[in-house]
Structures are given as structure tokens and as C-alpha cells.
Amino acid sequence: MASEKKRPSRRSLIVTAVAAAVLAGGGVTAWQLVGGEEESRPLSTEEASRLALSRLKVYQASPLRVTLKAQEGNGMVVEVQGVVDYRSKHAAGSYTVSGKNATIDQGLVVWDTGGLGLAKAPADASGPAWEQAEHVPRAGWSSRSYGTDPLDAGLQLLIQLGADRPDNPLLLVQSGPRWLGRDRIDGRDYDRIAGPRSRDAADKDTGATSPITYWLDGDGGLRRVTMRMAGLGTPTTLEIGGQDAGAKLPEAPWATAG
């Protein structure tokens, strides 16, 4: 967002510390390590090349449908259904906060590289969330910079997944990504890969893998990302869907947030 405003009282409340570092020359975000892992192996040259290509493929395929699901503690779950345009670095969607037995809150969310905004959907809401967001007046948005809770961390990671050029596979290999296995999702095979680590962690060679895991197909297409966070047993999950060619991300609130 272009400016930071007062934190909205309606946001979910658990806060968990997260640290992020961007690899020099690469651009893939490596988050704070969270301890030991299952058996794994270094990436092959071909696997590193696919991982390096994945952000460009996400960028080229956008606007993309995405789903985020984050555990916020105390039985609360936040789910976001949205669309991300990696060319404009803008995203919009709807969110739902659920407790153990009921829906606690729901509304619209927009986010970009600088932060996010939350709003109630218009009373006569219809159509996709990105279209509804266009009709919310400036005063209806509560905008802020990213915090460290699972929702914020997940949205921030989502907006960073696409890039207009591939990463450097040699730098990726040096930062310690690991092949963890292979899974089948919706009838298709995906390699499960622990992402790059921060430079300090890679230099220390602690043996711990990144808490961010990517699911890549044979062409470098990204299907799923999970992020473990200290103190939470269930990782935040990001699902990358198909292209939504008809989506047009709203000019507001970004154009009016100054």
C-alpha cells in the first residue's frame, strides 16, 4: 500500500515472529529456519533449473487464481480466495475467518508488495471479489503494512511468487534447496522441494531445511507452496490455480491510498 494506516480491530489476532531475507541476485525469499527435516537430497541440475524458472512461469500465466489457508491459533482459520496479477503486483480476493463452530468474520482483502487492506463487502455485493473491491470507497478500507502473523506472511509470500525473469539456478543451489519427494495432486505428479535458505543459514550449513516447500511439475509450473511457522503445528498453505484471464484488478484502493 502507498501509506500505512491504523491497524484494523477486525483482523485476526495471533502474532508469530517471522524473519525474511532476499537472496542476492536471485529474488526468491528465504524465511527463518524452523528445525530438522525428513530425509532429503540436494537438487539435481535439472531440478534447480525448474525451480529457477518457476517464478517466471507464474508471472507469465497471471492473473492467477489463488487460495490461502492459514491457522491463526485458538482454533481460528483464515481462508483467502483471490486473484493475483504479477505484472501489476496487485491482488484482490475475499477472506473468511472461521472458529471451531462458526464463521467469525468475512469480507474483502486487497494486497500488494507493501501491505494489505481489509473491507466489508458492499451490501449489494455480486460478482467476483476483485470486481466488488472496485466499488468500495476509500473510507471503507483499513490499510496497513505487513505484520508477522500467518495471514500477513502468507499474503506477502504470495505476491512475491512471480517475477519477470528466471532466478539464477547456480545461486539457488548454493543456498541449499532440497528435494524432499514426489506427490500426486489432481492426477498430476509434482516434485516436493524445500526452498532456498537465507545466506547466513546456508553458510553455517546447519542441516535444517527452509520452512517453505514448493510443489513443481515437470515444466517448472508451481502448484502449491506451504510455509511452516514457529509455534504453529499446521503450515500456511498457498494453492496456485489456473489463469483467470478475465480478471481486472481494481485501480482503487491503490490509486487513492496516498
Image (cartoon, helix red, strand yellow):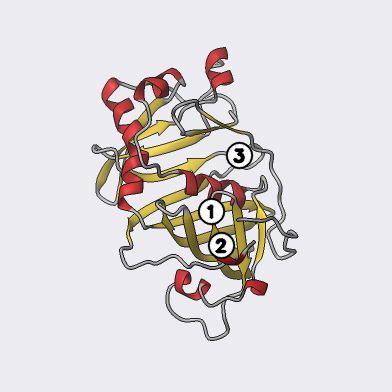
Question: In 3D space, how far apart are the residues under numbered discs 2 and 3 (Cα atoms)?
Answer: 29 Å
For the C terminus, the quadrant is: bottom right
In the image shown, does 130 or 178 lie closer to the viewer? 130
- Picture quadrant where residue 173 is located: top left
Residue at point 71% right, 47% down? 15
Residue type pointed to by label 3: Met
Q: Residues within 10 Å of mark 3 (few under 14, many from 20)?
A: many
Mark found first going from the N terminus, 1 or 3? 1
Question: Which residue position holds label 3?
Answer: 229
Mark 3 and mark 1 in contact (Cβ < 8 Å)? no
Image height of 241 relative to 128, above or below: above
Mark found first going from the N terminus, 1 or 2? 1
Residue type pointed to by label 1: Asp
* Res. 172 mark: none
Image height of 218 relative to 65, above or below: above
In the image shown, does 180 or 114 lie closer to the viewer? 114
* Res. 112 mark: 1
